[in-house]
Image: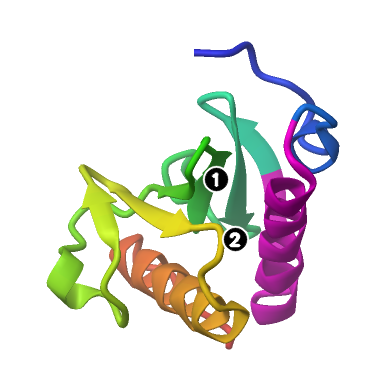
Amino acid sequence: MEKAHEFEFYFTDERLAPAIRARMQLTRHLVHELYPDVAERVSYAMPGFYPKKATKATQQLFLLMANKDHLGIYGTQGLEASDLPYALDMGKGSIRVPYDFPEDKFRKLLQFIMKYNMERHGLDLIH
């Protein structure tokens, strides 16, 4: 595992292909648009989005990682592929989103994941 960096680094890392960096930036933008009351911090050497009212480090909306062939969304324990609004490849507690996944569907997916995790952590989602 790579050493953790400052949060901003993950969205400006010049080692990432421009399209991958753009998808990382889009993800951050969509999170703030969908859930403005979000806190950003690095956890497990990944950028993570947390509700400001969370009282535990495990109460994340999700963690994010730019992988070679997909965007990894982590912190989705308990979700099954059949629960998702779209057919996507999943790992244990993670979702693999292709970089070319349509933006409108991606927005709905993020909204679904954040709502799921807010409910799973016993928190109320504002939006």
Q: Nearer the viewer, residue 40 or 12?
A: 12
Of the residues shown, which amino acid type is indicated by label 2?
A: Lys
Locate residue 81, reporting x and y percent. 18, 66
Residue drawn 26% across the image and 73% down it? 87
State the residue at coordinates (73%, 53%): 19
Which quadrant does the C terminus fall into? bottom right
Look at mark 1 in the image and give the residue it sits on: 64
Query: Looking at the picture, how far across and down is residue 50, in whole percent?
Result: 59, 54
Which residue is found at the position 58% from the left and 84% from the top?
A: 126
Is 27 in the magenta?
yes
Residue 45 visible in the picture: yes
Magenta span has 52?
A: no
> Can you identify the residue that label 2 sits on?
53
Question: What percent of the width, then of the height, locates residue 25?
Answer: 77, 56
Q: Along the horizontal axis of the image, is 22 left or right of 73?
A: right
Q: Which residues are magenta?
A: 16-40
Q: Secondary structure at mark 2?
A: loop
On the picture, is 103 further left or further right than 123?
Answer: right
Q: Earlier in the sequence, mark 1 or mark 2?
A: 2
Label 1 and label 2: CA atoms lie apart by 20 Å
Q: Residues within 10 Å of mark 1 (few under 14, many from 20)?
A: many
On screen, residue 67 versus residue 20, left or right, reads left
